[in-house]
Image: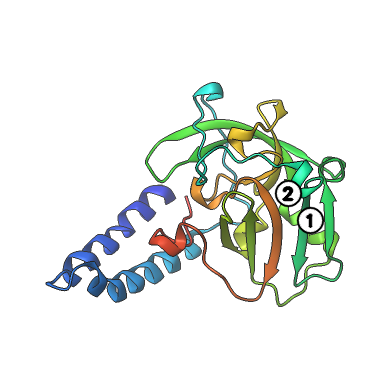
Amino acid sequence: MRRRRFIELSALSVASALWLACDSEGPRSARPALRAAERWNEKVERALFRHRSMDYGTAALAGAAYPKYFVSDRVPVWNEAERGAWSLEVTGLVDNPVRLSLAALQSLPSVTQRVNHYCVEGWTAVVEYTGVRVSELAHRVGMKPEAQYVDFASFDSDYHESWDLASALHPQTLVAYGLDGHLLGPGHGAPARLHSPIKLGYKCTKYLTRVEFMAERNGGYWSDRGYEWYAGT
């Protein structure tokens, strides 16, 4: 049985928990059961996670058909006149926090990978991202041993999502600045975004401004609204 299918089947425990918890008090009374079910699903996903398992997109690139998503009322665009030049802050439990301009980010060792993008809505698209591995950033800033999670924050209405450290350091988890051979456009998260095929799309923060290494997780925009926090593929 493929790992992805196994996870889908294990996720049925969430639906079962919801059905068991439904009563006259409505969805609120289901929350403890749902939280317990999510903890179980996360335990299963963590057990199945392989640090060197790689995803490869074999179909044609999605190109213009690749959907654009953001939570602001309009496409977020970094306004240099109001905010100054964009930079990426890499901070938290590190020895040498830094702020990287786009040029500085692009000067770091980069990779280009053709992978699948998995959406929680059920569709998949093949994309080709270019960027810097989060593991490269962690090495350069001297990540401290007590760091166990990483938060990725955005200028898209303060959107953020936190990740477990193992997933963040996976070799296919990138801070990307290029898509399909071109610089990112505003609709896909420019100037830089997080992307990895090992997480569902909503975990891949666009319009990135901060990478913070932490001892504890701190939820996320969709995670705090009932979506699964781990969200592995």
Residue indicated by mark 2: 133
Residue indicated by mark 1: 137
| Residue at figure coordinates x 78%, y 42% from the top left | 81
On the question of residue 60 being in view, the answer is no
What is the x, y in percent for residue 221?
50, 58
**Nearest the eye: 74 or 182:** 74
| Residue at figure coordinates x 65%, y 31% from the top left | 185
**Nearest the eye: 202 or 40:** 202
| Label 1 crowd bin: few (<14), some (14–19), many (20+), radius 10 Å | many
As drawn, is 128 to the left or to the right of 117?
right
What is the x, y in percent for residue 134?
72, 53
Above/below status of 9 relative to 212: above
What is the x, y in percent for residue 176?
69, 41
Which quadrant of the figure has residue 127?
top right
| Residue at figure coordinates x 53%, y 58% from the top left | 49
**SS assignment at label 1:** helix
The kind of residue on which mark 1 rests is Leu
What is the x, y in percent for residue 11?
33, 58
Above/below status of 188 relative to 97: above
| Residue at figure coordinates x 78%, y 46% from the top left | 86
Task: Report if the CB atoms under discs 2 and 1 are less than 8 Å apart.
Answer: yes
The kind of residue on which mark 2 rests is Arg
Above/below status of 120 relative to 90: above
Query: What's the distance in space between the residues labelled 2 and 1, CA to CA?
Result: 7 Å
On the question of residue 50 being in view, the answer is yes
As drawn, is 13 to the left or to the right of 164?
left
